[in-house]
């Protein structure tokens, strides 16, 4: 076997081996019982990479040394390349995008005209992943909402902008609006948050650090791997025998939600911002699948296991249910306090898991997102916000304010 063929052979096996290692999370997501199988396959691939050429081709000592050298070299190069790409990707985004660094990753690019053309009714939907989901596939709730409004008002140009992003909280939404979206001149803002603000209360790695901070500065979210980088040795150890060294995480009761104060503060801040700009605002609570009976399959819930109470426990389903109820109640109470239109999104979705509206504790199928869009559509019709905008163009500014619930 020539040195060139040996090198190609080792490149091939190094790529397969690392692809298997780094794709284990995706594999386990779809085949949760295949952990042992994946490790066996990895060992077989690793064995083949090292020894098959020697036993099958009876390599000479000179080529055997080359064979070992090539395999180790290509493994190291792939690891270095993967690490550099992983750890520098977000930093390069920070350098190249003109957005506030607290947002962690750039807002979705909005293909809208600025300044806004005359006659356009523009809605901005703020939120986390439950707002952002479906945007790429074309079945997000803002897209469905735009379809409904365009049919109801065929004579008007309606634009519904999806400004949600996974891991974002009320604080992210406020910063995004002030530094990114304000120039788009929205005629209406819709916002709902709960879950992402609730998880700010958990202060354990990898997503958070102690102590809790009211400005959410303890939470790393998307950049957790930069805050708590994992060495190659730790990664391999976790892959092959991490679950054999310590028991699985266990659920426990949790009732301390210090981020509730920050959540209410941020809601009031957004209300102040929109009122100062005379922009109608609709607030909503957040639908979820948690119950107060700790009976839902943990594989379906999935989210609690990622946010730890301590090194060995995560909050049980009953605790998450209590937390979501408290945060949802805070939204409604704040909306009532400041006379802001409110959409009860949570109640219509109670018990809807069995009907295929959810993919996990919070995120929804396209059918669920379509139902969610219908709730906001009905509220917009009820408030006659599009008609109010027509009156505004005719000089009826006070009429707009009155119909939009702005004192």
Image: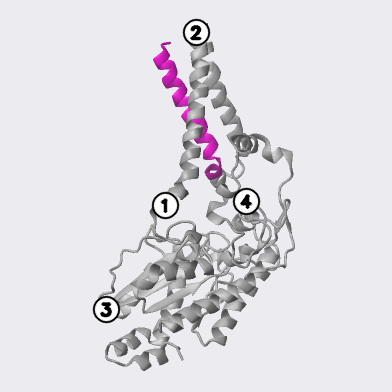
**Circle 3: element type:** loop
Question: Is residue 145 visible to the viewer in this orientation of the structure?
Answer: no
Whichever of labels 1 and 3 marks the residue nearer the N terminus, that label is 1
Whichever of labels 2 and 1 marks the residue nearer the N terminus, that label is 2
Q: Nearer the viewer, residue 372 or 118?
A: 118
Question: Is residue 68 visible to the viewer in this orientation of the structure?
Answer: yes
**Circle 1: element type:** helix
- Mark carried by residue 318: none
Whichever of labels 3 and 2 marks the residue nearer the N terminus, that label is 2
| Image x and y of residue 400, in percent | 37, 89
- For mark 3, what is the residue? 154
| Number of residues whose C-alpha sits closer than 10 Å to that of mark 4, classed few (under 14), some (14–19) or many (20 or more) | some
Q: CA distance from mark 4 to mark 3?
A: 49 Å
Q: CA distance from mark 2 to mark 1?
A: 48 Å
| Image x and y of residue 229, in percent | 59, 44
Q: Nearer the viewer, mark 1 or mark 4?
A: 1
Q: In percent of the image, x 72 and y 67: which residue is there?
A: 255
Is the Cβ of the residue at disc 1 closer than 8 Å to that at disc 3?
no
- For mark 2, what is the residue? 62
- For mark 4, what is the residue? 206
Q: What segment is highlighted magenta in the picture?
A: 1-27
- For mark 1, what is the residue? 95
| Number of residues whose C-alpha sits closer than 10 Å to that of mark 3, classed few (under 14), some (14–19) or many (20 or more) | few
Q: Nearer the viewer, residue 35 or 242?
A: 242
Q: CA distance from mark 1 to mark 4?
A: 24 Å
Q: In percent of the image, x 37 and y 67: which residue is there?
A: 143
């Amino acid at each position: 076997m020539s040195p060139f063929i040996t090198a190609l052979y080792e490149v091939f096996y190094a790529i397969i081996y690392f692809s298997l290692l780094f794709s284990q999370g995706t594999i386990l997501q779809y085949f949760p019982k295949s952990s042992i199988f994946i490790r066996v396959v990895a060992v077989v691939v690793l064995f083949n990479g090292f020894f098959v050429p020697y036993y099958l081709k009876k390599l000479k000592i000179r080529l055997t040394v080359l064979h070992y050298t090539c395999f180790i070299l290509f493994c190291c190069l792939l690891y270095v390349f993967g690490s550099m790409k992983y750890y520098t990707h977000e930093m390069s985004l920070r350098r190249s995008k003109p957005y506030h660094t607290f947002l962690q990753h750039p807002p979705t690019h909005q293909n809208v005209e600025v300044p806004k053309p005359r006659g356009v009714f523009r809605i901005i939907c703020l939120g986390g992943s439950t707002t952002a989901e479906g945007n790429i596939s074309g079945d997000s709730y803002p897209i469905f909402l735009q379809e409904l409004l365009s049919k109801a008002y065929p004579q008007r140009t309606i634009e519904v902008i999806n400004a949600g992003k996974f891991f974002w909280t009320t604080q992210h939404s406020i910063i995004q609006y002030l530094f990114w979206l304000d120039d788009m001149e929205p005629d209406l803002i819709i916002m709902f948050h709960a879950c992402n603000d609730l998880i700010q209360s958990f202060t354990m790695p990898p997503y958070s650090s102690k102590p809790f901070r009211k400005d959410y500065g303890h939470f790393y979210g998307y950049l957790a791997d930069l805050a708590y980088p994992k060495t190659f040795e730790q990664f391999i150890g976790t892959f092959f025998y991490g679950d054999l060294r310590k028991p699985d995480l266990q659920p426990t009761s949790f009732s301390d939600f210090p981020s509730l104060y920050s959540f209410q503060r941020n809601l009031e801040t957004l209300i102040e911002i929109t009122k100062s700009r005379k922009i109608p605002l609709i607030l909503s609570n957040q639908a979820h699948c948690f119950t107060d009976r700790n009976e839902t399959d943990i594989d379906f819930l999935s989210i609690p296991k990622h946010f730890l109470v301590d090194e060995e426990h995560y909050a049980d389903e009953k605790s998450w249910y209590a937390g979501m109820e408290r945060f949802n109640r805070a939204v409604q109470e704040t909306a009532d306090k400041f006379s802001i239109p409110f959409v009860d999104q949570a109640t219509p979705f109670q018990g809807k898991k069995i009907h295929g509206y959810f993919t996990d504790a919070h995120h929804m199928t396209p059918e669920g997102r379509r139902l969610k869009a219908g709730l906001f559509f009905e509220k917009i019709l009820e408030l006659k916000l599009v008609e109010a905008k027509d009156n505004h163009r005719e000089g009826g500014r006070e009429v707009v304010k009155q119909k939009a619930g702005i004192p």
